[in-house]
Image (spheres, grey):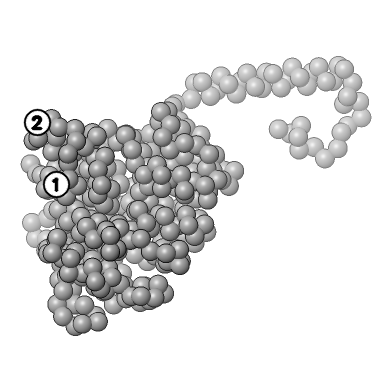
Amino acid sequence: SDLHNRSHTPPGSNSPARMHRSLVRAVVLSSALLTSLASAPTRLAATTSCAMETLLQKNNTVPAAPARPAHGHKGTYGTAIVIGGSYTMVGAPAISATAALRSGAGLCRVFADRELLHPILSIQPSATTLPNVQQHTQLAAAELPDKPYLVELKLDELDPDKKAVLAVGPGFQKPVEWADVMRDLAKGPRRAVFDADALNLLSAGQLLLNKHRANMSRDTLVLTPHPGEFRRLAEVADIKESPTDQDETVRATAAAKLSEAHNAVVVLKGQHTIVTDGKRYFVNQSGNTCLSTAGSGDVLTGIIAALMAQGLDGYSAACLGVHVHGRAAEQWSADNGDALGGLLAMELTKYLPKILFGK
């Protein structure tokens, strides 16, 4: 490399003898480099959009579930706030809320448009009680403001301690004007899981979060794209690797680059889901084709948010979350004649307590 960095060419450097010696030296160096790479541990070099290299270390250890101390109460086990829902997708935030509660969160609050509150609560009335700021009645949800810039103000009213974990995006279907809300929520102070339309807003708004999250720990935000959502995000980040490549190292590289671009943990969903924080990656081994059904991603979002609310960092919560999600599908299949289809997403949630906290 020093040959390329010289600012001038010494006299006589173009002589045949000197050129021959340089060529021999380059061949020897290249051979030594290849030998070194061949003898190194199995690691993956992923070049980020900033032309930096990150070494990914594979680690497939499934993290332990959060502890459940005997003296705990609902405040001990954290709060998840699901932000989502739309006229055509009322069930999505309700499914995420159910998954969060079934995964051990002490409280789960739903933040949605006014006309959606009662339908959501009719699906999951156990989403914890919360005063509706507009109506001053005791409801289990809060009205999402019409103006995007009021969202953080409303969140501060609902969660003044700023300790809740946000599950953002299930069924959200908001216009691109809401992209700035996603940017601001990603900046903290609350930890968050972004799924579905939260991810679509990032790509529609041409946002890369790394510069906005420069002072944030990477594991305070988890992005959970399926391959279609990943491709839209990858286009903004100029990531060329395919999220569906049969080579796991290619998919891990793609996910790691997105992790760098947004300074976030990335869960690249699919068969053998990849989880990475840009330095290490986890390949999930659980699950089956039962998960190929509407709403299963909403379940995963709720699981990960609940595990973060109970104290796991984003990477650990994501690794455990995808494992548990897959295990639930396996158990449903076993209980239904080894069926590999026909699962309703909400049915996954009943298996979560036993898988996470059973003996």
Tell me what residue is drawn at x 38 percent, y 64 percent. 174
Where residue 219 sits in the image (x, y, percent)? 37, 52
Where residue 250 appears, x then y in whole percent?
46, 33
Query: Residue 251 location, x and y as percent?
Result: 43, 35
In the image, 42 versus 199, the foreground residue is 199
Crowding near the residue tagged with mark 1, few <14, some 14–19, many ≥20 C-alpha atoms within 10 Å? some
Q: Which mark is residue 337?
A: 2
Q: Residue at x 14, y 77 (%)?
A: 138
Q: Is residue 340 above or below residue 151?
A: above
Crowding at mark 2 (Cα within 10 Å: few <14, some 14-19, many 20+): few
First-in-chain label (2 vs 1): 2
Tell me how many marks there are.
2
Q: Viewer-proximal residue, 67 or 116?
A: 116
**Above-or-below relation of 278 to 201:** above
Q: Quadrant of residue 217?
A: bottom left
In the image, what residue type sits under mark 1?
Answer: Glu
User: Type of residue at label 2?
Assistant: Gly
Q: Residue at x 52, y 57 (%)?
A: 206
Left or right of residue 136, residue 26 in this image: right
Mark 2 vs mark 1, CA separation in Å: 15 Å
In front of the other: 331 or 160: 331
Residue extending furthest toward the front: 88
Residue 260 visible from this viewpoint: no
Question: Would you name the residue on which mark 1 appears?
Answer: 347
